[in-house]
Amino acid sequence: MSNPPLNRSGEAKRHLPAPQPPEPGLNIVSTPIGNLRDITLRALDALAGADRIYAEDTRNARKLMQAYGLAGRLLAYHDHNGPAVRPEILAALDAGEAIVLISDAGTPLVSDPGYKLVKEAVEAGHAVRALPGASALLTGLAAAGLPSDAFFFGGFLPAKTGARRSRLKTFETIPGTLIVYETGPRITAALQDVATVLGDRDVVMARELTKKFEEFRRGNASELAAHYLEAGPPKGEITLLIGPGEAETLTDEEINRQLAQLIPDLGVKGAAALMADSTGLSRRELYQRAQRMKDTSF
């Protein structure tokens, strides 16, 4: 393998892509969730070249812009002013402007304003593109140590006990890791409700992700609830990750019956994959079983 070319100082030359100013249309731009160095080069290009930048909180956005020496037309877009501001944004898109939408932190529309704007922009025929970047739910999942092949994001849990338990009940049969956002003052009650409704599952509390006091605390739901009941509520933004429940217990006869129904339409591989996703059983073992059934019965 040849060595990389060197510059005059003897250092390897960097071959970075040329800057990419944002194209006309609605550009959904992810921003750091804590550590400012998690900004992407494309995000900086978009912020530097946008005709207008709409932010959930212009104060937070201005701090980010100032950190990178950027100055742009910064305007507010949030849940309260959305109905009044969306026509203004759509008119700017009609005029061929490059519009950037950011949230307070992370990826816009993930428990943040923006869905109605994107929907209306798409319906009006405007280009909508997303510039990927930081996301608390994916950052938490990557380091949690819980199953990551299938997961479900449930947003913020309701504040009141009855509504929170009802929401958790709807998550009971999801065959994957459940991810929700929660606040420090409500974390103990939320963990208690998780243990009551979903069972004493493995849980990871991830807070202040990418920041100086980042913390992952692991245990089952009742253990973490007892910890915070004694220690007091944790500070900062919290991503709560809840492991999947135990796989459904099926007899050999029931497994064979379900596979026999699926194989004619989905084939051996498809039947095994679908059943593994819905029951939590081993995909490899289901595939081998389905193959034997096909060889002897079909």
Image (spheres, helix red, strand yellow):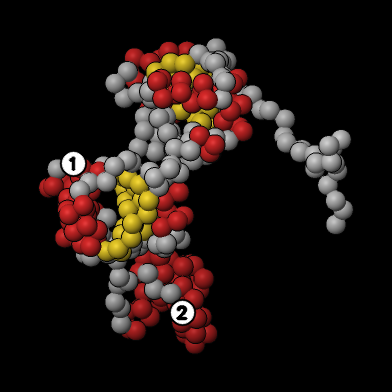
- In terms of depth relative to the viewer, which is nearer, 292 or 249? 249
Label number found at residue 35: none
Asked if one can make out residue 18 in the rendered structure from this viewpoint, the answer is: yes
Asked if 213 appears above or below 246 in the picture, the reply is: above
| Amino acid type of the residue tagged 1 in the rendering | Ala
Q: Nearer the viewer, residue 119 or 180?
A: 180
Query: Helix, strand, or loop for circle 2?
Result: helix
Note whether 55 is above or below 204 in the view shown: above
Return the residue at label 2.
Answer: 285
Q: Position of residue 212 (x, y in %)?
A: 43, 43
Whether residue 157 can be seen here: no
Number of marks in the image? 2
- Give me the residue at 43% from left, 74% from top: 282
Q: Position of residue 267 (x, y in %)?
A: 51, 71
201 left or right of 31 in image? left
User: Mark 2–mark 1 contact, CB under 8 Å?
Assistant: no
Residue 73 in percent (x, y) is at 50, 13
Left or right, residue 117 beside residue 171:
right
The residue singled out by tag 1 in the image is 159
- Residue drawn at x 31%, y 25% is 79
